[in-house]
Amino acid sequence: MSAPVIHRISLRPGGGAAAVPPAGASRRTFAHPGWIILASSLWLATAANLPLWLAMRELALFERSGGWLFAIAFGLIIAASLAGMVSVLAWRWTLKPVLAVLLMAAAFGAHFMLAYHVVIDGSMITNALQTNPREVRDLLGPRFFTSVGLLGVLPCVALWRWRVDYGRWPRRAAHNFLQAAAALLALVLLTLASFSPLASTMRNHKELRYLVNPLNAVYALGKLASGPQRHDNTLQPLGLDARVAWPPAARAPLLVLVLGETGRSGNFGLNGYGRNTTPELARRDVASFRNAWSCGTSTAASVPCMFSSLGRAGFEARKHDTEGLLDVVQHAGMAVLWVDNQSGCKGTCDRVPSVNTANMAHPQLCPDGECYDDIMLDGLDERIAALPAERRARGVVIVLHQMGSHGPAYHLRSPAAFKRFLPECTGNDLQGCSRDALVNAYDNSIAYTDHFLSGTIDWLRKQHAYDTAMVYVADHGESLGENNLYLHGMPYVLAPDVQKQVPWITWTSAAFAQRSGVTSACLRGEADRPVSHDNYFHSVLGLLAVQSSVYRRSLDVYASCATSPTDEVAGRPAAVDRQGRKPGGPA
């Protein structure tokens, strides 16, 4: 009979016994934490950065003199950065969880960068954090599970099975420090050795910095987390002096603001597109600005910006948060209602009545648990009637937030009756679809938006108690494979025009046009005038004849067509300066 194996017992610091493998036996199966950090960092720097290496190949960076040596140095720089970051967390209860999070984050990032050629920055991280289950469903598929499985799940399984000898905490602390110092030294030396090609590459190809995986996500999360420290989160009031300038005898206005989703200006027939994607609007007396530009390239960036008074540059540089357009309208005494068929208002409707229609039950309008945009008109009369009567008497503003053309599952955004362009792409693997099928699916969603906007105009025509108008503006555009880019969310400075140029369509009833002077005929004369989301806040206030010190007439795209509002007391045109202030009014 063989002799039993004797295990020595050692006491852990703070009490408790731990079995110590006998010398020469199972101790050999335990690895030093440094090896697991090195292996994981190299895996992340190589396989998980496939989008980066492919992008560098497309830019012919490997073909220049010393290109491959620079690529190797760049990969080692990434690995050294990751190793140094993880080394300070190489403790028994933190090392594997931290590495697992990095591996999975890198797998997700690599998939989306490969599948849609997006990049990872703060805006993209914000979009991911605000994604709802319905949007997640649209992104899943065989390619997703394959990528995440190979790049994330399998390495995590190997990581968790890797037996590690952490040792006692004083030695572990010393080793962590030495590992981090060694990684930092390697990072400095590698950077100095490759500084010239590295600096040139990062300067001439700024998009590459957003492909360094998963450091791009780590940096973006850190920047988002530090946001509250960079500006005051206390909400500042805005436009408390707002008031409606129409005379009391005038009929109250009813303005519908349709907030479009993922609208490419160039794919609207009204704007000269080769296909007639907007036949119903073409039969309405509408005007379209063909040269309109967004505040951002994602919903999370654009919507809060366009409803603010600051403009894109001011919004990005703001030191504190302020109230927005809908708050000013409420300060003027009007009724406001936000109806959402999307993933939320991104904070712009937090202080106004709101309703979400995205998950309502309707046999025709909500098949398979997703509602078409027409659902927002269903029961809208009753929703308006429920608003305070004293506010309705001053005017009503309704915001309809579309599902619109939200991708990548464009085919889900239009009912069968509006699928005029076939065959269409019916999957979320956009690179697996032909260019024609992808554009067909997107254009069908625009055709349905055309129907929805026309239906909104028809509904407004029945509101005989109000003078009515509608303004449709999309939050951002979309890439449909141009330059091998898909979806949206590129950093603004790098984004192609198709992600930033948006439709802006206006309709006014005869009564509204008569009292405001804003006619479609006048607006069509300025169809090519450059406008942007910077104009939105002031233009809506101008349409509603809301006077306030925050209104800027020079930013009101309707001001050139509008007549001055009638003075309530004297019955004569009110004097308004170029900033929209009456003489003697608040500065």
Image (spheres, rainbow, N blue to C red):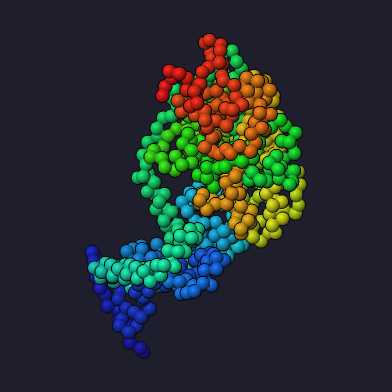
Q: Which residue is nearer to you in this view: 241 or 102?
A: 241
- Seen at 59% across and 28% down, the residue is 560
**Relative image position of residue 123 (x, y in whole percent):** 49, 49
Q: Residue at x 76, y 47 (%)?
A: 420
Q: Nearer the viewer, residue 525 or 510?
A: 525
The quadrant of the rendering that contains the C terminus is top left
Up-down relation of residue 268 to residue 409 (above or below): above
Q: Is residue 67 left or right of residue 451?
A: left
Residue 448 in sight from this viewpoint: no
Q: Quadrant of the N terminus?
A: bottom left
| Percent x, y of residue 406 | 61, 47
Residue at image position (71%, 45%) is 273
Count of marks, rendered view: 0
Examine the rendered structure and indicate whether residue 326 appears above or below residue 72. above
Image coords of residue 453 (percent x, y): 67, 35
Displayed quadrant of residue 96: bottom left
Q: Position of residue 397 (x, y in %)?
A: 57, 27
**Which image quadrant is residue 196 in?**
bottom left
Is residue 318 visible in this depiction of the protein?
Answer: yes
Drawn side of residue 430 relative to residue 567, left or right: right
Residue extending furthest top? Answer: 570
Relative to 81, is 501 above or below? above
